[in-house]
Amino acid sequence: MRRLIGVLTAAALVAAAATACSDSGSGSGGKIKLTLVQGMAGEEFYETMACGAKRQAASMGVDLKVQGPQKFDPTLQTPIVNSVVASRPDGMLIAPTDTKALIAPLKQAKAAGIKTVLVDTVVDDPSIGVSRISTDNVKGGATAATALAKQIGDKGKVLVISTDPGVSTVDARIKGFEQEIKANHPNVKYVGVQYSHNDVSEASKIVNAALAKDPDLAGVFATNLNSATGAGSALQQAGKLGKVKMVGFDAGPAQVKQLQDGVVQALVAQLPGDIGAKGVEQAVAAVKKQTVTPSIPTDATVVTKENLNQPDVQKILYKAGC
């Protein structure tokens, strides 16, 4: 009888252990372990995303780590991804820095059983990412086009300055901008996109050359902060600051200062905190084998001097930290 009780007790312990493992992710304390790999550490968009992810992780009792390269560069991000894969978290949130270069390391993560959620940016392989969460960047680009057309009286030449081809978010913004201008603004002449390689001085050179070629340039859409900073510097040197209108993307402290100083006339603000929070939700659902939403678009808002101080706009401005 005592032997039977011992056998039953041992069986109960095994069953309890199995139940505990099935109810939680891997890791100590039964907590699900996630890692967020940012596109760039310290950048306000990704820091705001991290804050949203951390708040959601804390509310769900999830262990979340945050890492990121010092530059938005696939050669710097790939070793971080490889290190994360080696540490075997239950799930990973990542903003890939290139649509192609990150495919191979993310395939390794998938092969290792790590549930991967793509946040903000994506890769070209549709099999990667149990969920993809980002701003509807095509819509965001169209919003920028509408805002710029309004600023220039719906007529004149406009230029786009972007970072590099092959970054999914800015590629989509350019696409949306081009489509909106061509479809709905017949008196606005789109003179094309030029790439600054995310370099302020290169963006400045591009605008200087554009002004020499087209002295009647009416507007610029800068797809990110460095493009807007370089373009603004060139416009200031040419005495055309505020005369050539500019719309920028994102709403970190530096972008908001550009708006206040009249360097840009409007900003298209994303919701990175929401992206981070939703990323955690979807990763946890995937780990728990619950229903996952494959694609979640988030919205964007136009910020101008006129609405900058409104409470609902203040809430969506990016922060340098939590």
Image (cartoon, grey):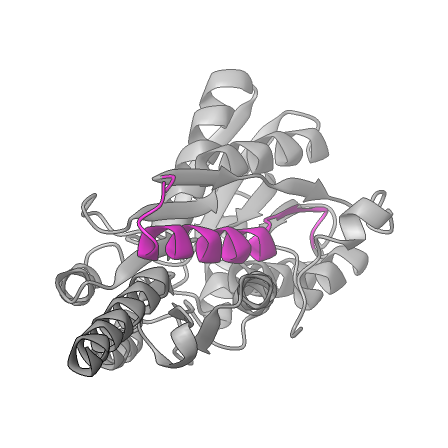
Q: Residue drawn 41% across and 50% down? A: 282
Q: Looking at the image, is 150 positioned above or below residue 224?
A: above
Q: Nearer the viewer, residue 160 or 8?
A: 8
Q: Nearer the viewer, residue 158 or 86?
A: 86
How many dots with numbers?
0
- Classify residue 116 as left or right of residue 58: left
**Rendered location of residue 180, percent (x, y):** 50, 25
Q: Residue drawn 34% across and 49% down? A: 168
Q: Is residue 82 magenta?
A: no
**Rendered location of residue 303, percent (x, y):** 73, 45
Q: Residue drawn 24% across and 64% down? A: 114
Q: Is residue 273 magenta?
A: yes
Task: Determine which quarter of the picture holds residue 260.
Answer: bottom right
Q: Nearer the viewer, residue 310 or 143?
A: 310
Q: Looking at the rendering, in which quadrant would you find the N terminus?
A: bottom left
**Rendered location of residue 257, percent (x, y):** 75, 64
| Residue 201 visible within the image | yes
Q: Looking at the rendering, in which quadrant would you find the C terminus?
A: bottom right
Q: Residue drawn 65% across and 75% down? A: 321
Task: Determine which quarter of the picture holds residue 220.
Answer: top right
Q: Looking at the image, is 61 positioned above or below residue 115?
A: below
- Classify residue 82 as left or right of residue 61: left
Task: Determine which quarter of the picture holds residue 283.
Answer: bottom left
| Residue 71 visible within the image | no
**Rendered location of residue 263, percent (x, y):** 71, 57
The span shown in magenta is 264-293
